[in-house]
Amino acid sequence: MTDKKYVYAFEEGDGKNKMLLGGKGANLCEMTQIGLNVPPGFTVTTEACLAYLDKNQLPAGLMDQVKAHMAALEKRPARASAAAATRCCFGALRSAMSMPA
């Protein structure tokens, strides 16, 4: 396991740090922190992406961090809404800032 932090909860991330969190990740962090209605979640850093592209394998410790964040999300109570039945949603989009081609 590594001490390198590759995963940030939306509550943890810095909305101004787009180079680390990617544009979408940083924006989700910022929206969460200012109180907009954003489902709880996390983002994987661009450093993890670059490490994968460099070595063609996931960086050490990444999946442990993802699993820990997923477990934390599973423990959170569901919000009372129509979307509460859909507890888990994953999104992955490429952008020039977050996922180098």
Image (cartoon, grey):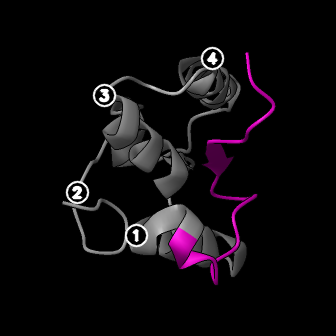
Left or right for 28, reference 49 = right
Is residue 45 something one can see in this rendering?
no
Residue 56's mark? 3
Q: Which of these two is toward me, 66 or 80?
A: 66
**Which residue bears the numbered disc 4?**
64
Q: Quadrant of the C terminus?
A: bottom left
Labels 4 and 2: the sequence-earlier one: 4
Labels 2 and 1: the sequence-earlier one: 1
Q: Element under label 4?
A: helix
Question: Amino acid type of disc 1?
Answer: Lys
Span colored in magenta: 1-19
Q: Quadrant of the N terminus?
A: top right
Q: Element under label 2?
A: loop
Labels 3 and 1: the sequence-earlier one: 1
**Which residue bears the numbered disc 2?**
93
Percent position of residue 34, x then y: 69, 82
- The reply to whether callout 2 and callout 1 are in contact (CB within 8 Å) is yes
50, above or below 87, in the image:
below
- The reply to whether callout 3 and callout 1 are in contact (CB within 8 Å) is no
